[in-house]
Image (cartoon, coloured by chain):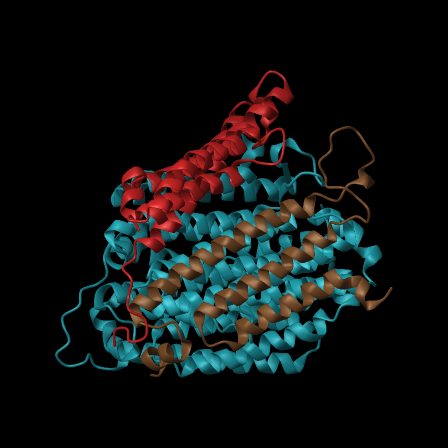
Chain colours: A cyan, B red, C brown
Amino acid sequence: MDHHLPVLVVVTALVGAPLCILVRQPRVVWGLFTAITWSIAAMAVTLLLQVLSEGPVRYALGGWPPPLGIELRVDVLGGFVLTIVSGMAAVVAPYSLRSVEQEVDAARVHQFYAVLLLALTGLLGLTATGDIFNAFVFLEISSLATYVLVSLGRDRRALVSAFRYLVMGTVGGTFFLIGIGFLYVQTGTLNMLDLAAILPQWIDTRTSAVAFAFLTVGLSLKLALFPLHLWLPGAYSYAPSVVSAFLAATATKVAAYLMLRVFFTVFGQAVAFGELPVAATLPAVGLFGALAMSLVAVFQTNLKRLLAYSSIAQIGYIVTAASLGTQAGLTAGIGHLFNHAMMKGALFLAVGCIAYRIGSVRLEEIRGLGRRMPWTAAAIFVGGASLVGMPLTAGFISKWHLVSAILAEGQWGLVALILTSSLLAVAYVWRIVGFLYLRDAPSGAAPVREAPLSMLAPTWALVLANVWFGLDTRGSLGVATQAALGLLGGQP
Amino acid sequence: MTDHVVLRVIGKLLIPFILAYGLYVQAHGDFGPGGGFQAGVIVAAGLILYGLIHGVAATQRVVPPRLVEALAAVGVLIYAGVGVVTLVLGGNFLGYGALDHSPSHGQHTGVFLVELGVGVAVASVMLAIFYAFASRKPIASGGGRR
Amino acid sequence: MSILAHYNDWAVIVLMMAGLYIVISTRSFLKKVVGLNLFQTSVIIFYISMANVTGAAAPIVTEPVDAADYANPLPHVLMLTAIVVGVATTAVGLGILVRIHEAYGTVEEDEIVRHDFDS
């Protein structure tokens, strides 16, 4: 069955969703969800190891050979992103039992898990596919599921945020579709490798340039690149805790993955960075966004919203690194994709623990929680340190490689922007830590117990991963280097 | 709307034919324009017409919401299940050729089953959307809750 | 090649810009959904008109013939999928709007912002 792994990863999640609907009993559905996510994670890791040792895997759906049929194609980068997404789902699964019971109406729990599995299906399928229209379909599957998940938050503002997300996400998806249309007019194919082979001879045409512009803008909307980020803070702040953590760690990452695919696989490095002005525009846009969003984050009073703005800033770093067009930059970008998934996953899960116990994530409400919920507060402290880029954490590794990749290009101005934005990160993380440890609890506050173990354990698993990958980078940057080589070498 | 005799009579005349036409489009998809998606929408349209004439409650007696939800899941399961069966039989995912002794027979069976799954899923999802909107309690517009 | 020869492209551009303009400019959430629909429809016309082959017939082949005599069926199939995506988006969007209306009593952005997002 080994050569079926690319499709099994996606289909297992797809089969899981209707099973959840049929089963209905909340606890049983949760068990099913956990079993499915864990088996998908195991398959994704197996697939990654297989790709690392034997090279990219191609799979013809329905036995129709590409470019006529739709093919799935997993290279090192694909396997890496599949592992991130399915791993995050697996970590979130044990956490979700208590959190979802509290935040979602009991009659809707089975639907919640079904929609979560559909979102997972979309994200995994989008990563595994080698066909650009198929990628659009999976992108919309995951986005539609995400709108629904966000709208399930308890606050009524979740509805408005979900609707704004829907409007901007649909515009982004449709832009992507228009871009695909122009590519198809020009080349007559939708297979990514086939496109890569045919496009270079037509690259001087205006059609190709327009296609590239539409694809880039559409994906920028989906990954919330500043200044197209307006949907993200609301969506992350008001969604249920589990959804915030899962989305922050995966959804925008997968959109970034698709952007890398378009830049490096479909158009190719020579075209995207030779003929088209990617390297001249995107790094500056990304870093300016990182700076602006870090500044906004400093003034937030809601913990989740603060982390959401910080996410937009981090997305700016990823796009900057990847759009330098060098191997060092690409490695730093892919590495940060992984590291950021872990830090934001850990932080959002820890914030979810707070929400579970005190029902609010406003900064005034968490005063003095460091003594009353020591494990949760410590998780936020370590996660925050990683976000800032303290040595011995994964965040430091990311920043280090990002800065050295930019220095190699001699762009001193950009380095200054990164350092400023990192200082701002220190400011907002310090603000959280100050509220947690240095202020006294509000007088007359109800006694608070530590979060349950089923929620603390996944949080701390991610926190420890942050430390682990700050010390041993073979699993993160080692794979990222190979993924970057695979993208740049244009190997099939 | 139950006192509109014309609507009720015409509805009773039309709805069986709409449903039968849906089944025809479903089964005929192999030979001409048609298939599960169109068939599902037609069948759902017939049931929604019934709902418009006799009210949502009456429709939900014929097709309960729980059944609709389950059928939507079953439709997706049929689709994915065919794919998994082809995997087990040694083909690729959705490689219908593995379903029968000769590939062309296999294609025929495979497409028929997949379209059946699509038809069931589309019809029940369309109906579920109708239920979701129609069974909400209307709120007087303008003032609203302040 | 006169400008009028590209009438299909003009239709696409006008519809696309009208849809996008509605999405951006209107303050009513309901009208935003309508705008999105218009925007998506323009893309469908864009694909379908690209599939046309001058003087060709509908792609229903009854006997083996030259492929150049028939329109390209692939964009039609792609658009079937895009229509499904569009329908799903509209359904989810309207579903959320119904709940917004239940929670706020309005679907006008200005009033909702006044209720909740001022602080």
In this view, the residue in front, A130 or A294, is A130
In the displayed image of the protein, which residue is found farthest to the right?
A: C1
Q: Judge left or right: residue A180 versus residue B60.
A: right
Residue placed at 80% from the left, 51% from the top? A198
Q: Quadrant of residue B10?
A: top left
User: Which quarter of the figure is the C terminus of chain A placed in?
Assistant: top right
Residue A92, horizontal then vertical, whole percent: 37, 53
Q: Check the image and report above or below for A132 versus A275.
A: above
Residue A130 appears in the figure: no
Residue B49 found in image quarter:
top left
Residue C63, quarter of the rendered image:
top right
Residue at the image position 28 percent from the left and 56 percent from the top = A104
Where does the N terminus of chain A fall, quadrant-wise? top right
Left or right: A91 as drawn, with respect to A445: right
Which residue sits at x=48%, y=79%?
A294
| Residue C72 picture location, percent across and down | 74, 44
* Residue A309, visible in the rendered structure: yes
Left or right: residue B13 versus residue A286 is: left
Viewer-side residue, C69 vs A38: C69
